Image (cartoon, helix red, strand yellow):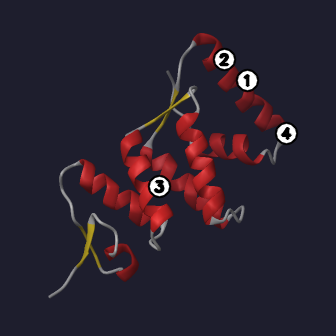
């Protein structure tokens, strides 16, 4: 199994470079044929959300549906899937940004919640708390 960088997933998802998208498609098809899964690090998930939102204008509903589809793709193995799922739930239900949801979900998974924050929106997450004096 190999790991994927953010730019590989971006090409596959937005199809804005035909040659690179074709290369990525062959890579995923090879993984499918071999019954393997390509590893997606948690840091790639974090960067992917930022790139899709800031560079390609993906709105929250598109981010949610895209990441849900990634979780369901057999040829991909997301690091700490349960953390990503919890982050998506927090992102779907609240007003915090995805990065804060991911940070809080990671703290929860490590049994190190709450995430202490100065961000009032993030502090509304179940696994976060506003840092007070």
- Image coordinates of residue 9 in percent, x first then y, are 64, 42
Q: Which mark is residue 117?
A: none
In percent of width and height, residue 46 lies at 48, 54
Q: Position of residue 99 (x, y in %)?
A: 44, 63
Residue shown at 36%/80% (left/top)? 119
The residue at which mark 4 appears reads as 18
Q: Residue at x 45, y 40 (%)?
A: 41
The mark nearer the N terminus, 4 or 2, is: 4
Per the image, the residue denoted by label 2 is: 30
Question: Residue 121: in sight, yes or no?
Answer: yes
Rendered location of residue 97, percent (x, y) = 48, 69
**Helix or strand or loop: what does disc 3 sit on?**
helix
N-terminal label among 3 and 2: 2
**What is the distance, in whole Å, between disc 4 and disc 1 at their CAs?**
12 Å
Residue that label 3 marks: 88
How far apart, in angstroms, are the residues tagged by discs 3 and 2? 29 Å
Q: Please name the residue shown 71% across and 31% down the image.
A: 24
Q: Secondary structure at mark 1?
A: helix
Q: Quadrant of residue 58?
A: bottom right
Q: What's the distance in space between the residues labelled 4 and 2, CA to CA?
A: 18 Å
Give the CA separation, mark 4 to mark 3: 30 Å
Between 95 and 38, the one nearer to me in the picture = 95
* Mark 1–mark 2 CB contact (< 8 Å): yes
Q: CA distance from mark 1 to mark 2?
A: 6 Å
Q: Earlier in the sequence, mark 4 or mark 1?
A: 4
Q: Residue furthest top?
A: 34
Question: To which residue does mark 1 refer?
Answer: 26
**Residue at horizontal 75 percent and vertical 48 percent from the top:** 14
């Amino acid at each position: 199994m190999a790991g994927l960088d953010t730019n590989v997933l971006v090409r596959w998802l937005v199809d804005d470079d035909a040659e690179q998208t074709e290369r990525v498609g062959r890579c995923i098809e090879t993984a499918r044929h071999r019954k393997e899964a390509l590893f997606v690090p948690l840091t790639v998930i974090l960067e992917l959300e930022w790139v899709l939102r800031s560079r390609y204008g993906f709105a929250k509903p598109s981010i949610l549906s895209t990441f849900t589809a990634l979780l369901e793709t057999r040829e991909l193995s997301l690091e700490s899937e349960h953390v990503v799922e919890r982050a998506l739930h927090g992102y779907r239900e609240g007003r915090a940004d995805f990065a804060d949801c991911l940070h809080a979900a990671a703290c929860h998974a490590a049994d190190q919640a709450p995430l202490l924050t100065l961000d009032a929106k993030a502090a509304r997450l179940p696994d976060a708390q506003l840092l007070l004096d």
